[in-house]
């Protein structure tokens, strides 16, 4: 069910919650690490290394080949998108819109301050806390990884909007 999970995840990236049950990949280990003090917790830079393997994989992908594979399997992507209830919409349009949304993710100064109003940490900055699940993922991976992901997203976006059926 990789394609179905991928489509569901992409569709949910601009939302507030990203259902972990639909993720097409295993989340990084170990758990989220906090630095700073109890009164002023912040994201630890050690968290960023949790994402190294994902960034290496992203870096190794050939964008032209990946796009060709996507086009080849596009009917399966479209079918999975329709199964989510989008009968009169195109998955490719949604994918481009989600990429545009992710590219709008801010690049705040590090370290990012956190708050712990309950069990889970939130962002101390209300503007960052209001971001969507996909944008928060890009914050979580760190500034260097975020820059790389945005570069790759721009490249894929250019290919996706210039597809010739």
Image: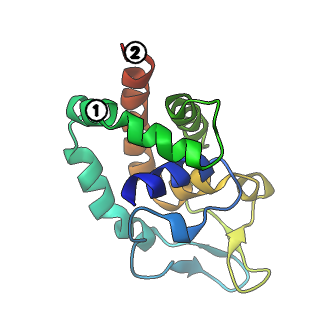
- Quadrant including the C terminus: top left
Q: Residue at 36% of width from left, 28% of height from top?
A: 155
Q: Is residue 60 left or right of residue 31?
A: left
Q: Tell me the CA gap for discs 2 and 1.
A: 16 Å
- 64 w.r.t. 32: above or below: above
- 11 w.r.t. 5: above or below: above
Q: Residue at 73% of width from left, 82% of height from top?
A: 39
Q: Nearer the viewer, residue 105 or 26?
A: 26
Residue 43's image quarter? bottom right
Q: Residue at 73% of width from left, 80% of height from top?
A: 116
Q: Which residue is mark 1?
A: 72
Secondary structure of the residue carrying numbered label 2: loop
Residue 161 spot, x, y in % from top left: 45, 19
Q: Is residue 23 left or right of residue 109?
A: left
Q: Which residue is mark 2?
A: 162
Residue 36 spot, x, y in % from top left: 59, 78
């Amino acid at each position: 069910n990789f394609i179905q999970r991928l489509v569901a995840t992409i569709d949910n990236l601009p939302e507030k919650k990203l259902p972990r049950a639909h993720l097409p990949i295993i989340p990084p280990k170990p758990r989220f690490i906090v630095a700073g003090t109890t009164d002023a917790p912040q994201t630890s830079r050690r968290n960023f290394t949790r994402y190294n393997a994902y960034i290496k994989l992203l870096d190794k992908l050939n964008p032209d080949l990946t796009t060709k594979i996507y086009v080849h399997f596009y009917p399966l992507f479209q079918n999975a998108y329709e199964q989510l209830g989008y009968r009169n919409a195109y998955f490719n349009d949604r994918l481009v819109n989600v990429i545009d949304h992710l590219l709008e993710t801010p690049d705040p100064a590090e370290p990012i301050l956190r708050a712990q109003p309950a069990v889970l940490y939130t962002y101390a900055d209300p503007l960052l806390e209001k971001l969507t699940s996909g944008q928060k993922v890009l914050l979580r991976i760190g500034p260097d990884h975020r820059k790389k992901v945005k570069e790759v997203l721009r490249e894929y976006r250019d290919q996706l909007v210039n597809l010739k059926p």
